[in-house]
Amino acid sequence: MTTSSLSDRPARVLFLGTPSSAVALDRWTELQDRLDLAGIETTTAFEGEVDYAILTEDILDGYCTAAEALTLQKLRARGITCASTCTGPEQLLAALAETSADVASVVPISAARARTYGRAVGNAV
């Protein structure tokens, strides 16, 4: 399965879940604002074409409603990349520029944290 070309329409990012802490809510809002400024459409409803998805940590960890779990299954079946709010805006924009992958992977929150902390520790040494 190949996603549609972004040149035909604006990129669209799904935000799924409800942030459970003030820090997660701040990241959530920051990502939405940065994407809006970049001309990328954001949505909270999985309707039509979606190019990328930002999910709460709870959903990625499996703590979600049945409806959220079903949406996650649909995202995976369509090969849409899913990430947490730890994804930086630049990383997200780069991923959207390369949306021609056949099957995209889900980036667990723990892996995103490990890469971030690993870089921070490596840079501090």
Image: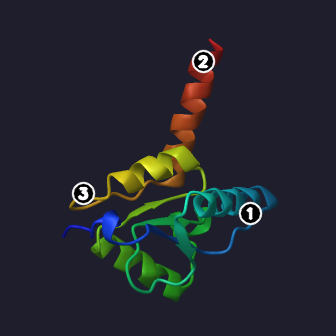
Where residue 80 appears, as percent x and y from the top left, is: 35, 67
Give whichever of 10, 49 is nearer the camera: 10
Element type where label 3 sits in the image: loop
**Local crowd size for mark 3, using a 10 Å CA cut-off: few (<14), some (14–19), many (≥20):** some
Asked if residue 15 can be seen in this view, the reply is no
Give the distance between the C-alpha atoms of the residues marked 1 and 3, in whole angstroms: 29 Å
Q: Which residue corresponds to the image point at 71% horizontal and 63% vertical from the top-left?
A: 29
**Local crowd size for mark 2, using a 10 Å CA cut-off: few (<14), some (14–19), many (≥20):** few
Q: Identify the residue position indicated by label 1 in the image.
A: 25
Q: Identify the residue position indicated by label 2 in the image.
A: 123
Which of the 4 image quadrants contains residue 104? bottom left
Amino acid residing under circle 3? Ala
Element type where label 1 sits in the image: helix
Q: Is residue 112 above or below residue 2?
A: above
Front position among marks 2 and 3: 3
Q: Which residue corresponds to the image point at 51% horizontal and 36% vertical from the top-left?
A: 115
Q: How is the image coloured?
A: rainbow
Q: Is residue 110 above or below residue 35?
A: above
Give the distance between the C-alpha atoms of the residues marked 2 and 3, in whole angstroms: 32 Å
Where residue 116 appears, as percent x and y from the top left, is: 57, 36
* Residue, far top: 125
Element type where label 2 sits in the image: helix
First-in-chain label (2 vs 3): 3
91 on left or right of 81 = right
Amino acid residing under circle 1? Leu
Asked if residue 116 can be seen in this view, the reply is yes
Q: Identify the residue position indicated by label 3 in the image.
A: 101
Placement of the C terminus among the 4 image quadrants: top right
**Local crowd size for mark 1, using a 10 Å CA cut-off: few (<14), some (14–19), many (≥20):** some
Give whichever of 104, 65 is nearer the camera: 104
